[in-house]
Amino acid sequence: QSALTQPASVSGSPGQSITISCTGTSSDVGGYNYVSWYQQHPGKAPKLMIYDVSNRPSGVSNRFSGSKSGNTASLTISGLQAEDEADYYCSSYTGSSTLVVFGGGTKLTVL
Amino acid sequence: EVQLVESGGGLVQPGGSLRLSCAASGFTFSSYWMTWVRQAPGKGLEWVANIKQDGSEKYYVDSVKGRFTISRDNAKNSLYLQMNSLRAEDTAVYYCARDNLSGWNFDYWGQGTLVTVSS
């Protein structure tokens, strides 16, 4: 099971919106509505930001939103803030022996 | 408050063994699937293994099958990962994570424990 494909880096200015893509196959992203997104600051544990494609856990800002079209999922962050600068990882259920696969991660820089 | 605290990491020689533990508190441990996720230095996240609430189902990433064993003790609110025949490529921070009840995502994570496999 290959890792999901994410851009290595994205950037944006404070107040702007950015979108991070996560491309898989029909065996993972495209086959199930079990895509999640995690935020990880340096030296810290990951934090769940979006689950089941578009649901936000309690306490996560509504500036974060998720969507999916075919084999590609997307995380959009609106109204960028300095604190959003972090690494972001997508993940998906696969239905195979490797139950969950992650993307390679995207480094978000807030300019 | 949900807390997950890993321990047991350290330096081990190739071919050696290590047992990681994760102490859970602040929630009904026996009601949740639990998962281990690892992150090699400077690399991305990798799902390693998970275990059902009663321990009756366990799943592993192909690269650790036959070498790692996930287990749990619900009476002690603890999750374990027994790692045998360790290789250099197993070097990583290992995170314990709680599976969200909606399934296939992880809503709480520990701080991680570093495992270094080197001679």
Image (cartoon, rainbow, N blue to C red):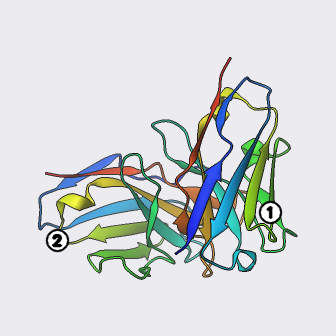
Relative to A72, is A32 on the left or the right?
right
Rendered residue at 60%/72% (across/down): A31
Rendered residue at 72%/80% (across/down): B31
Relative to A92, is A63 on the left or the right?
left
Relative to B41, is A14 on the left or the right?
left
Residue type marked 2:
Gly
> Where's residue A40, x and y in %?
40, 55
> Where's residue B28, x and y in %?
68, 79
Q: Is residue A28 visible?
A: no
Residue nearest the observer in this picture, A93 or A83: A83
Residue nearest the observer in this picture, A38 or A7: A38
Residue nearest the observer in this picture, B24 or B66: B24
Rendered residue at 18%/64% (across/down): A81
Q: Chain of mark 2?
A: A
> Where's residue B1, x and y in %?
52, 75
Q: In the figure, residue A63 lies in which quadrant?
A: bottom left
The answer to whether the residue labelled 2 contacts the one labelled 1, judged by CB atoms less than 8 Å apart, is no
Relative to B54, is A98 on the left or the right?
left
- Check disc 2 and report the residue beneath it: A79
Helix, strand or loop for disc 1: strand
Residue B72 got which mark?
A: 1
Is residue A15 depicted above or below A106 in this figure? below
Q: In the figure, residue B52 lies in which quadrant?
A: bottom right
Residue A18 got which mark?
A: none
* Number of disc labels: 2
The residue mark sitting in front, 2 or 1, is: 1
Residue type marked 1:
Arg
Is residue B102 depicted above or below A38 in this figure? below
